[in-house]
Amino acid sequence: MHLSEHFPLADHHTFHVEANSRYWLEYTSIRDLHDFFNTTEYKDSPRLPIGSGSNLLFDGDYPGVLLHSSIVGSTVIRESDDAVWVRVGSGTLWDDFVETAVASGWYGAENLSGIPGEVGAAAVQNIGAYGAEVGQLIDKVEAYCIPDAQLQCIDQKECRYGYRQSRFKSDWMHQYVVCAVVFKLSKIPHLNLSYADLENAVGTGRSISLNGLRKAILKIRNAKLPDTNQMGNAGSFFMNPIVDQARYEWIKDRYPEVKSWIQSDGRVKLAAGWLIEQAGWKGRQLGRAGVHEQQALVLVNLGGATSKEILDLSARIQEDVQSKFEVVLQPEVQIVNGFL
Ligand code: EPU
């Protein structure tokens, strides 16, 4: 266990905004967490587990303890004729795991190639891309339960995964620290090419290998999403909003080209990037914060932006989208301030 005080965060989140954390705990084992939470000095401090900070925006200094996992690596714990169960440490880079899965011929994670961040945060956030979500691949989450002071092995169903949602982000917030995730991947070849961008990249009716699909996805992402080391960002800043049929019809009547996906409950998910582009924000900037030229859903730090500049920009976008479409955009990025 390694505890640092007054820890600078600019290199620990991908927006690269200047901020400090009162404490930063690097934990390498469950024992570390156990020892830490039994220390009365830190017991009541605000606390937040953090991965690579690829989905966070620090709005000012963090007054508590940020907990970062150094539990890394993956082990096959079970295998059948058609599936494999792999336990992966929460501090493992997500894309390192995807690379291993693809190289091993395990199917399921390839559409999530190139997503920044670590395995623990991926399981909390239910990362998704190109028609896949990590929650579909999870068998169990091994997490330290702070109130019970013990490791728990939580079944996937219990986590209630939804679009960028899980119980770790809602009713279980602040209670668990993820230590490892058990994924169940398939040994049976099956690729999911249903997402429009993938169909276009592969070509209708053509076949592609598992590794070929990973490469195609990395290429699409690199073309659309800015490199966080060159231009600070946290991927999609907002979630794609899900609206009722009436709102969708209202928009469709006026903008027949609206980009949308019908949900199983009849509601309709709209492409927030499209809404933002229609509201005139694509490629624009406000102070040192901007809207990416290739993907309007991505807000960027153009160099030295403060969190206030980024939040002012996001508020202006929300206002304009609401007044044009009567749709409320909710941040996908977790805004971290003293109250979290
Ligand atoms: N679009 C526009 N203008 C834009 C951006 C997008 O018209 O500026 C349109 C596109 O033409 C397309 C549709 O919106 O028809 C969807 O765009 P895209 O395929 O780029 O995906 P997205 O819905 O904007 C979501 C995820 C991404 C993920 C991609 C690919 C969310 C919030 N975002 O974006 O995830 O990579 O799908 O599956 O669901 C992230 O979460 O940080 C992230 C990058």
Image (cartoon, helix red, strand yellow):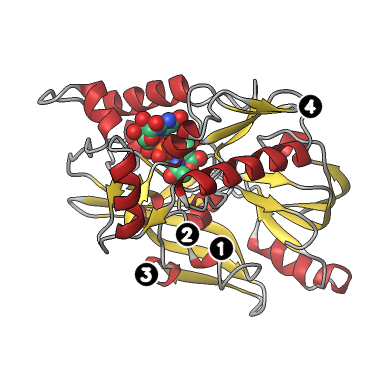
Within 10 Å of disc 4 (Cα), the crowding (few <14, some 14-19, many 20+) is: some
Farthest-out residue, left:
205
Q: Which residue is mark 1?
A: 169
Farthest-out residue, bottom:
148
Within 10 Å of disc 2 (Cα), the crowding (few <14, some 14-19, many 20+) is: some
**Residue 96 left/right relative to 210:** right
Label 4: element kind: loop
Q: Which residue is mark 2?
A: 165
- The image quadrant where one finds the C terminus is bottom right
The picture quadrant where one finds residue 92 is top right
> Which dot, 4 or 3, sits closer to the camera?
4
**Residue 277 left/right relative to 138:** right
**For marks 4 and 3 on the same chain, the one whose residue lies earlier in the sequence:** 3
**Residues under numbered marks 4 and 3 in contact, where contact means CB atoms less than 8 Å apart:** no
Q: Is mark 1 within 8 Å of ligand 1?
A: no
Q: CA distance from mark 2 to mark 4?
A: 31 Å
Where residue 139 sits in the image (x, y, percent)?
36, 61
Q: CA distance from mark 4 to mark 3?
A: 42 Å
The picture quadrant where one finds residue 45 is bottom right
Label 3: element kind: helix
Q: Is residue 240 above or below residue 286?
A: below
Q: Which mark, residue 157?
A: 3
Label 2: element kind: loop
